[in-house]
Amino acid sequence: MSAPRTGADNERWFHPFAAGEPWAVEITDAVDGWQHTSLRVATLPAGGEVGHDLDGEEVVVVPLAGAVDVVVDGQTLGLRGRASVFAGPSDVAYVPAGRSLLLRAGAEGARVAVCGARVTDPTGGGRTPRVVTADETPVELRGAGSCSREVRGHGMPGTLPEAEQILVCEVVTPAAGWSSYPPHKHDSDRPGEESVLEEIYYFETQAVGDADAGRAPVTRGTERGDGLDPVGYQQVYGTDERAIDVLVEVSTGDVVLVPHGWHGPAMAAPDADLYYLNVMAGPGAERAWLICDDPAHGQVRESWTGQRVDPRLPMGATR
């Protein structure tokens, strides 16, 4: 029997939304023990801009709310964006290392994420910027029943084969659902079975009924007029050899870092839908997402046979 989780490592690996400038969220290798991935999130007014030089990292730019132009060395990549992360996939932009980019919000303002990964070639190796459109993004419904989730793989190898290290996807879990389940890990180099990857979880939440009412997610610390507080929960736990203990409540703008260990479930409260953006990269030469289930819980996959995928998925616009 494993010891109960207490959240003993929350202070180190949980980063609540802080509304800084110019980046409201900024996860880099300045975080102790963090090496391979980065995440920057900006909230921009209509026509607002923020710049960033890609020094030794490649990025995928993901509009979370609103439309965004990504200007790369004078070239403009227009991203159509979306009303919110719960409204379906967005166009995203891949930008290789060694470039300078400028993000410019559209007429309604924007919240935009810059997902990064450290690379060995600081010049970008001849790679070119490109847009992965919403129509090109594969949408996969995984699991079944209470473990149903929607996965949008806009920055994974099958969709973005030219990237060097970065892996990016986003997951939507309907209210009362569990995802990132069974708990799994990717912290050991076992070719063909498991890869070594750091992982960032960036969360957003919406109260049930928000989408129908046209309300976009508001960040932690923002008062809602109706007094509701949509939240989810995330846990990360380790092995006897590599301990880690994270158990935390999350809402829009919050980040959980997974340096190693089993992670999951990500739990949506019964009155709130849960979204998370995953950014992954590691030191290996092969760019692959290879995972190992916690053997204490892996058998749950067998229970999905014969169950329906939650009919609330896929969420948002259909294509």
Image (tube, helix red, strand yellow):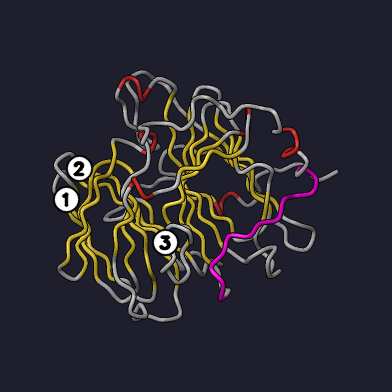
Camera-side residue of 260 and 308: 308
Q: Which of marks 3 and 2 is nearer the N terminus?
A: 2
Which amino acid lies under the numbered mark 1 shown in the image of this protein?
Gly
Compared with 47, 232 (above or below) is above
| Residue named by callout 3 | 160
Q: Position of residue 252 (x, y in %)?
A: 42, 39
The structure residue drawn at horizontal position 48% and vertical position 61%, both measured from the top left corner, is 157
Q: Earlier in the sequence, mark 1 or mark 2?
A: 1
CA separation in Å, label 1 and label 3: 28 Å
SS for dot 2: loop
Which amino acid lies under the numbered mark 3 shown in the image of this protein?
Leu
Q: Is residue 291 magenta?
A: yes
Q: Earlier in the sequence, mark 1 or mark 3?
A: 1
**Mark number, residue 48:** 1
Left/right of residue 133 with respect to residue 264 in the rendered view? left
**Where's the N terminus, which quadrant?**
top right
Q: Which of marks 1 and 3 is in front?
A: 3
Camera-side residue of 229 and 258: 258
Q: Where is residue 100 in the image (x, y as percent from the top left)?
A: 24, 70
Left/right of residue 172 with respect to residue 126 in the rendered view? right
The structure residue drawn at horizontal position 21% and vertical position 67%, both measured from the top left corner, is 72
Q: What stretch is highlighted in magenta?
A: 285-297
